[in-house]
Image: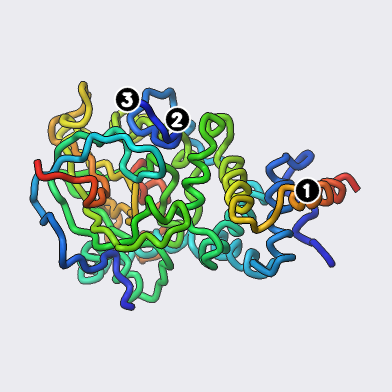
Amino acid sequence: MSKHNPADIGGEPAGAIDTVDHGLKFWEKQANALRNTLTSGRIVRLDELRRAAEDLGLRYYRLDYFQRTTEALRNLLLEKGVFTRAELERKMDEVRERYDA
Amino acid sequence: MTPSAYAPALQRRFNVGDRVRVKAVHPPGHRRTPSYIRGKAGAIERVCGMFPNPEELAYGFDGEPKRVLYRVRFKQTDVWKSYSGPGGDWIELEIYEHWLDPA
Amino acid sequence: MTHEHAHPHPEDEGPPSEHEIMSRAMQELLEEKGLVTAEQVRRRMELFEQEFPQRGSRVVAHAWTDPAFRKRLLEDGKAACAEWGLDLEADRLIALENTPQVHNVVVCTLCSCYPRALLGMPPTWYKSENYRRRVVREPRAVLKEFGTVIPESVAIRVHDSNADMRYVVVPMRPAGTEGWTEAQLASILTRDTLVGVALPRA
């Protein structure tokens, strides 16, 4: 049986669960709030975000939860033409410089 | 709209208690029916209502016409080849009508 | 134009990751394009931080003390919460009753669906791949990893929150809590008890 969806993992063998709650970093809380604001405002749908995460393919397994949701959001917004890759890269450079300053 | 966990589903194929089997198909694309339950047989536990089809919403369509969503209960011993727990354990999922056939 | 939200927060140590930069950059672009405002995002953060996390334990504590509310909660979680004054937004809540014969546990194997408007953000373990992989197939072994032992005489119902419904477990009220106030009862209804990996302790 071929598996198309990397998120479709129920029942797979796996190791111990880290049962400690590690909470969220500030940027993750903000990312979550952004995602929530976008879905409430119908700018994106939750179903689209889930699908965009699944479309990451094998990369899905190399990212942690917020890395995954961030890349999924980026890919979806690019897909929808909300911004271009060039715009995003420019803005990321700006943000990066502010941290270095 | 009065808040409710449920939405009406007057036109539907199945009722509570009906035996159903999840289709054993593996189409590409966004599906909310986990692989582990495909091909398994269980019983309708409750009718959740009619909702826009997530398989369409995922690609920017409006998901209409709405599909009937059910909660289906399965015996764990029917789902896993070597389930290590007692026979009385259950697993319950939400399955869309178009994924179900009578069992 | 100020970007107060883009400066490093004292909580976070070390340089920002690429994903943090990506996320902040996306938010700023969305603000510039008028699709979201910083205030909206800030307000959602507040709700998730302050409002949502305290609701679940209060709702279940109330169900423990008020049999009529409990019945309505079990019939239709969202409607009961609405009547009680809690707007669960998009969450279609189903409350699952633990009994001496049945123990309920919740997962979302496909992503991390969780009644966020009732419980706040899910714990990291709930979103972890290993929990999602294993709890559907070996719930008793998984619960043991959380220190929770369910005897074989009690049936376990695992609920995979895979579509439009959201779930909260109504644990059994432990002995030794007679006469407790709702606030005291709420204090033992931790998030883990409301997902089903722990039992409330008096």
Residue indicated by mark 2:
A17
Which of these two is toward me, A21 or B60? B60
Tags 2 and 3 both on a single chain: yes
| Residue placed under numbered mark 1 in the picture | A92
Identity of the amino acid at label 2?
Ile
Give the Cα distance between marks 2 and 3. Answer: 26 Å
Q: Position of residue C8 (x, y in %)?
A: 78, 50
In which quadrant will I find the N terminus of chain C?
Answer: bottom right
Callout 3 secondary element: loop
Taking the spot 28% from the left edge, 58% from the top edge, the residue there is C95
Have a look at marks 3 and 1 and say if they share a chain: yes
Q: Residues within 10 Å of mark 2 (few under 14, many from 20)?
A: some
Which mark lies nearer to you, 2 or 1? 1
- The subunit letter for the residue under badge 1 reads A
Residue at the image point whose x is 29% and y is 62% from the top = B66
Q: Which amino acid lies under the numbered mark 3 shown in the image of this protein? A: Met
Between residues A61 and C169, which one lies in front from this camera angle? A61
Tell me whether the residue at label 3 lies in contact with that at label 1, contact meaning CB atoms closer than 8 angstroms: no
Residue for badge 3:
A1
Residue C148 drawn at (x, y percent): 33, 35
Provide the secondary structure element on which disc 1 rests: helix
Q: Is residue B56 visible?
A: yes
